[in-house]
Image (cartoon, coloured by chain):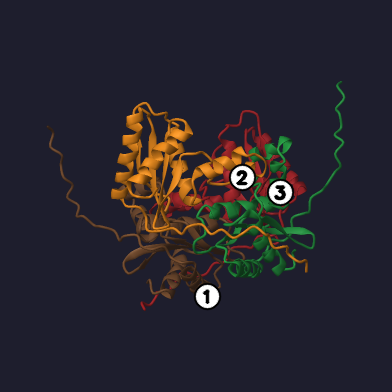
Chain colours: A red, B brown, C green, D orange
Amino acid sequence: MAEIARPTVPTVLPPEYGTPLTAAQAAQMMKAAEDCANAEGWPMVIAIVDSTGSLLMLHRHDNAQRASVDIAIAKATCAVNFRRETRVFEELVAGGGLGTRLLAMPGMTPLEGGLPVLLNGKVVGGIGVSGMHSTQDAFVAKHGLAAIGAL
Amino acid sequence: MAEIARPTVPTVLPPEYGTPLTAAQAAQMMKAAEDCANAEGWPMVIAIVDSTGSLLMLHRHDNAQRASVDIAIAKATCAVNFRRETRVFEELVAGGGLGTRLLAMPGMTPLEGGLPVLLNGKVVGGIGVSGMHSTQDAFVAKHGLAAIGAL
Amino acid sequence: MAEIARPTVPTVLPPEYGTPLTAAQAAQMMKAAEDCANAEGWPMVIAIVDSTGSLLMLHRHDNAQRASVDIAIAKATCAVNFRRETRVFEELVAGGGLGTRLLAMPGMTPLEGGLPVLLNGKVVGGIGVSGMHSTQDAFVAKHGLAAIGAL
Amino acid sequence: MAEIARPTVPTVLPPEYGTPLTAAQAAQMMKAAEDCANAEGWPMVIAIVDSTGSLLMLHRHDNAQRASVDIAIAKATCAVNFRRETRVFEELVAGGGLGTRLLAMPGMTPLEGGLPVLLNGKVVGGIGVSGMHSTQDAFVAKHGLAAIGAL
């Protein structure tokens, strides 16, 4: 039998999934994210999913682009299902070469603005924001995390 | 009449499809792949399809990322439907240029960790693994192949 | 102002979602369900999902009809997402009249053989079986529940 | 532990899947089905899949309704994936009551005109016809089966 060469990349274990976000926590996050967006005058779609990947809350502002409904949900879901900021994947794609393969990965949304919600080291949900430049989307999303001490 | 320029690339014929993997063979492959993953401490999703592309067996470990369910199935299916290791396609995408077009190919999953199962030179099924670094995914998948003498 | 007529149906609250099934629990359930199916000589597809609706384990037996892969997953997922036996929905559809509307309900699989897994009164997962007559499918599924004390 | 009531319906095992139809067999079937359709003056879509459920051959006649492309494929695929004539499912649905549930079954096409191709008692493929009344569709499909001794 052929010998199977063992890869030398280090083992990096992702955080575990935890108890799903509650509706009350989602409301706190949403208020902070919307306050941020309103203060900036940015029309946004903000989506919050729990650790099961199920949509908990979505607000679309007047004048937000319609495509952003699906994009915000996709960012939040990707952050939960891969347990990482979507910005990480965006950077891998932007780097070209091997990173390009992520464009074909099922469930992947390599666009900044999706963040997992981590409490006590566990993934309890995700937030995704879409509507403006992706760095602005992430700025709003981080205000949501901060509101429940998850930044 | 216009003359039709004959392409000069050599003819490379892929292996034929053979009799589908049995449930017993899939169970042997799964056990070996899981033993490998457990020995390494890697939470994985392992999917095995037969030569018809239909799912035979799937195991998701505790703490495996949820996105890996669809990815493992997609890798196994791609390996059967294109009768080649998915790593080959990953390399073509990573090389850029013409290889980039694979991202738009229906049924394509250019992510290392999907391998066709070849017995007596025929494709009888496929195995797809997802959850860790893609080289680790492939390492686990190869243990599955070895278990039935298909490496 | 128009008065809003209050519906008179009683309030029935469904069970809560609990901590997701583990891979070890799924393996116990799978073994018991397969032992039952093998004892009867029934080729089956058996799917187990956790309380997040994500696939944990799937086994397809030799000679099970191929359509049963999607059906088993759909039954298990429906049982979790609606937190009830799929048989209940089947009966409503079979009764005709108002029950017929269930056919148009997103995520609905009104086919006997999908059961929620309840531990300590909470929904921790679901099991779906397909391949034979739907009463036989449910018989096999119940053996899975019994194996972890969830019947 | 609760006792699990064993269902009393008899065990009916479906035929096994066999070696996939060849392109030559599909061509014979197609010629016979088209000769039949042409003799009647019926514009049809005729689809033939092999035992893996993969499309082998599809012919659409001038003036056939465009929707029939998907319908013919669906009928042929359903006949293979459930290993039965689609007419059987049509009748169950038409009977109302419990049969109505088939409308919600993944992969189900309860419309006459899809037949499994059985050779030596094994399912080697399927043929689906669409374009006229469903009894006419089935009439054409049966000429395809007869051409290779599969009626």
Name the quarter where the N terminus of chain B is drawn. Answer: top left
Q: Which of the two residues, A96 or D73, is positioned nearer the viewer here?
A: D73
Residue at image location 62% in from the left, 34% down from the top: A42
Element marked by disc 3: loop
Residue at image location 42% in from the left, 37% down from the top: D139
Residue at image location 66% in from the left, 52% down from the top: C112
* One can see residue B63 in this view: yes
Report in which chain the residue with disc 1 lies: B
Element marked by disc 2: strand
Real-space CA distance between mark 1 and mark 3, rounded to the nearest whole angstrom: 35 Å
Question: Which mark identifies residue D109?
Answer: none
Q: Which of the two residues, D98 or A124, is positioned nearer the viewer here?
A: D98
Report in which chain the residue with disc 3 lies: C
Give residue C58's position: percent from left, percent from top.
57, 61
Q: Which residue is mark 1?
A: B35
Real-space CA distance between mark 1 and mark 2, rounded to the nearest whole angstrom: 37 Å
The outermost residue toward the top is: C1
Q: Which residue is mark 2?
A: A128
Instruction: Evaluate if marks 1 and 3 touch, with contact meaning CB atoms under 8 Å apart.
Output: no
Q: Would you say B30 lies left or right of B96 here?
A: right
Give residue A4's position: percent from left, percent from top.
40, 75
Q: Is residue C104 above or below residue C35?
A: above
Question: Which mark identifies residue C82?
Answer: 3
Instruction: Evaluate if marks 3 and 2 touch, with contact meaning CB atoms under 8 Å apart.
Output: no
Q: Would you say A35 lies left or right of D125 here?
A: right
Q: Amino acid at mark 3?
A: Phe
Q: Amino acid at mark 1?
A: Asp
Instruction: Evaluate if marks 1 and 2 touch, with contact meaning CB atoms under 8 Å apart.
Output: no
Element marked by disc 1: helix
